[in-house]
Image: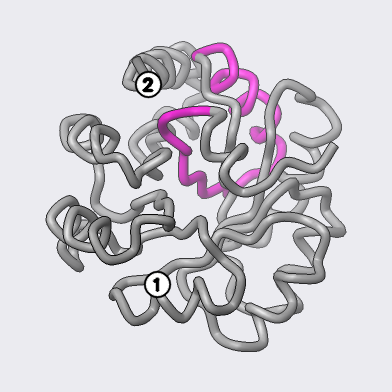
Amino acid sequence: MTLDALSVLRLSPVMPVIVIRDAARAVDLAHALVAGGIRALEVTLRTDAALAAIRAIRDAVPQAVVGAGTVCTPDQLAQAVDAGAAFAISPGLPSRLAAAGRSCGIPLIPGVATPTEAMEAQDQGYGVLKLFPAEAVGGKALLKAIGGPLPHLTFCPTGGIDAASAPGYLALPNVAAVGGSWLTPDAAVAAGDWAKITALASEASALGG
């Protein structure tokens, strides 16, 4: 069953923003995150290994809901769907990507940075958005301000958020989850320190109350 965008965000209070450089590590990494209570996993399309990693996680870790991040073009969206991504996340919403997202068969969570961009995304049919880069564009203060005139929008702020700042975001009524890279430190992934990643995931999962 295909999840909608809001259901994806509600799987976990923190969505790990994952950069996979070696697809052979993807399954162990996903198992470590799921063991810590984190089920929605964003694998960014920033490396050549990303699509293979998405496919491997989809096939081997059924408890995980794996999606593609840093989706910038319709072609990348199509490749993500072909790899088995259950959702897609983009840093912005150019018109061609907005159109492709409406017909691709999986939810697209587009990035916005201003009220105007949020309103434009809503006009394009997108009510669940990524605020990016969150800390750089105003973070919690911006989300509080947007919540008044745009109460029907829901956000996953990403960019510069860490374990210390995440609870403040999650306390906002228009935030369903936050995105962050701190759950999958490069050194821990490279060393195969899956226990560390499970511990970080457990701490993040507990932020959901």
* Residue indicated by mark 2: 208
Q: How many marks?
A: 2
Residue at (31, 72) in percent of width and height: 113
Q: Which residues are magenta?
A: 12-36
Is 154 placed left or right of 132 in the picture?
Answer: right
SS class of the residue under badge 2?
helix
The quadrant of the image that shows the N terminus is top right
Q: Give the answer, above or below, for where 28 lies relative to 18.
A: above
Q: Nearer the viewer, residue 84 or 121?
A: 121
- The mark closer to the camera, 2 or 1, is 1
Q: Position of residue 49 (x, y in %)?
A: 68, 54
The quadrant of the image that shows the C terminus is top left
Residue at (35, 43) in percent of width and height: 175
Q: Position of residue 109 (x, y in %)?
A: 56, 59
Locate residue 88: give its quadrant: bottom right
Q: Amino acid at mark 2?
A: Gly
* Residue indicated by mark 1: 118
